[in-house]
Amino acid sequence: MSGDIRSEGNSNYELQQSVSTWTAFCATLKRDLLIAFKRRNDLLNPVMFFLIVVSLFPLGVSPDPMELTRISAGVVWVSALLASMLSLDNLYRADYEDGSLEQLLLSPQPLYFLVLAKNIAHWLISGLPVVILSPLLAYMLYLPAEAYTTMVLTLLIGTPVLSLFGSIGVALTVGLGSRGLILAVIVLPLTTPVLIIGAKAVTDVMFGVPLASHFALLGAILALALVMSPLASAAALRISVN
Amino acid sequence: MTTNLQNSVFSSPSPSIAAQPLLQARQLFCERDERILFSGLDFELFAGQLMQVMGSNGSGKTSLLRILCGLNDHFEGDILWRGEPASEQREQYLASLLYIGHRAGVNRILTPRENLRWSAALHSPVDDHRIEAALARVGLRAYEDIPCRNLSAGQTQRVALARLLISQAILWVLDEPFTTLDVQGVKDLELLLAEHVAAGGSVLLTTHHQLSVSCEVGRLNLDEMRRLS
Amino acid sequence: MWLWFSKLGSPRWFYELSSKWLPWLYALMFVMLGVGLVWALLFVPADYQQGQTIRIMYVHVPVASISLACFPLMAIAGTITLVWKMKLADMVAKSVAPIGAWFTGLALASGAIWGDQIWGTWWAWDARLTSLLIQFFLFVGVIALRSAIESPDAAAKACAVLAIVGAINVPIIKYSVEWWNTLHQPASSISFDAVAPNPPEIWVPLVIMILAVYVFFAISLILRTRNEILQRERRAQWVMDLVARDQQK
């Protein structure tokens, strides 16, 4: 069959190839979203976790509005980071156990795009709800009104990076019988730049500091993560399935 | 068999090299946990051939199949696909290959239809009629839209085997495909294998089950290999 | 070139060569360490701002500079492991991780002692200390991953991937921490940077100390790698011969 296609000329073959890569990408994205929506209860967990962690801070620190305002940006960002960590485990676990991961690796399509599809699905399931819920939590922490847009925007750029970096860690540890906290130990240090820049942008906007460099840096990290981290995840998956 | 080959659905790139083996392993060496599984292993698999890999438990049958598919790279030696190193034409090689391992690759939450749709899309998408026909052929008519967690182990294996029917791959690599199948399932699969071989396809499989198929069965015995080396 | 490269990949060749090198390295290290330490501790004039505390610099700077070199080194070794499947590269990568963690820990500790004298606190979220701390976490991650994966081959490759990802991240972390810190609070005007434009009697002993500690690092790395070689090649004939010869002595 492949012989027929090749004989029609190289450009046609390449076109055909990229069309089927796109199909495989969409199918993988659709599949992961479908699985998530069939397990609606699990879908709520990252969001609930986010909500609970954020509400622990007023309890643990102080209910004083002044104090909460000061820490609000950091609290929302740290909680988003932890919520994204919590949901990472589902990313390749089930696929590893039922053998779907082997099928993924044996697809003739570039693994980069298939991994990217899975990461995007993970972000849509766990990152986006956190972003959407964040204004409510910011309100509960007395974040000043002028910082809302910045907070949502930085989370919107930053949480995909968390999914992409997290994916590398999950891919490296998916074959381990007992992982415990190793995933967090591996992934959290990698995510510190995003946390630093994201939380700082929200704090800075409260003090009227211009924000251009914050978004430039976050955008640069996202671009780098989009290019590099699916490659690293793909390599890690091949190692884990070996 | 030669007549079958001529109107086979699998056209090889050029007819002049039809006598060339489809898949060829040269001097394979594999060591696991400081134990040599096989060394100096050579074999050839031609189009229209069924080969059964034999060997006792732990003799490296699964490792061999995974090495040939490129899932395992703890080996030395060469794997040639249509005479060229498989690693240099990964895309074409994988497009011609279908692997079903111990773990069926069937998601428990999705239905058989959804599972097959994804499996097909990873290679080349097929329309729903073919998926329904494939599921009917493996005896899962009316189970198309039931979540796979509600299916029995044998039925789950049948979902995996339905992939053989919607695939265009010329080479099937099957690791213990008969486990958990009932008597009828075993017969159906044997028929399917014979049909594939008759149409010019190749099969490489491991099983402890006594194959009764209408075609010739090549054998590769890992235990004997080890004794000789 | 290629021949040399593949020869270098042979653990046995490395083991035998390093046996010849080690005495020289030891001698070099003791001489330089002796000269450097005596000079730095006894003869360097006290700093007009920091007083005697400046002498901590002669330990802190060499240790910190090596801890920064460890991650790139681990990533290079990892790349060689992944691309050329060279066994020796992974043995080096495995040996670097704990040494790197130790050096980072030492840099943090010496920084803390210095901070206690200058800032009046053991720990400050200073840009340099913070990025060292995060780098320490990265080392811990690599070591944890190595010990969690049972198969040595899979562990080698997995750690190589993590080391490469980490090495790409280290400059980003360093840059973002500096950026965060300088905007956060005016950087403490007193830091080791103040030493740079100083006269030779201050920086020459520093260079000697840096070189001495580098040699010490090289020796530790070689010793660890030799251990790793013996461990992994314990079934090889040359290792058995070696052990037999040792027992005869």
Image (cartoon, coloured by chain):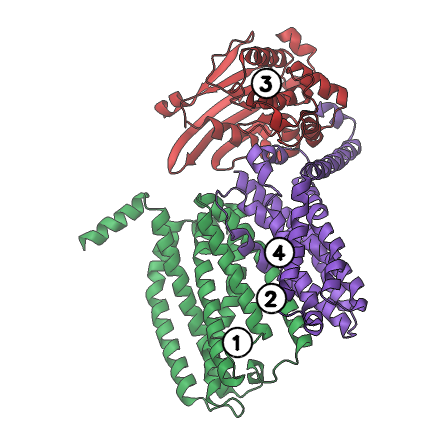
SS of the residue under disc 2: helix
Cα–Cα span, label 4 and label 1? 25 Å
Relative image position of residue A176 (x, y in whole percent): 50, 43
Residue ID for mark 4: A82
Q: Colour of chain A?
A: purple
Which quadrant, please, contains the C terminus of chain C?
A: bottom left
Given this view, does label 2 or label 3 mark the residue nearer the observer?
A: 2
Q: Colour of chain C?
A: green
Given this view, does label 2 or label 1 mark the residue nearer the observer?
A: 2
Q: Which mark is residue C123?
A: 1
Q: Is residue C112 visible?
A: yes
Cα–Cα span, label 2 and label 1? 23 Å
Relative image position of residue A191 (x, y in whole percent): 62, 59
The numbered mark 2 sits on a residue in which chain? A
Given this view, does label 4 or label 2 mark the residue nearer the observer?
A: 2
Cα–Cα span, label 2 and label 3? 66 Å
Q: Amino acid at mark 2?
A: Gly
Residue ID for mark 3: B202
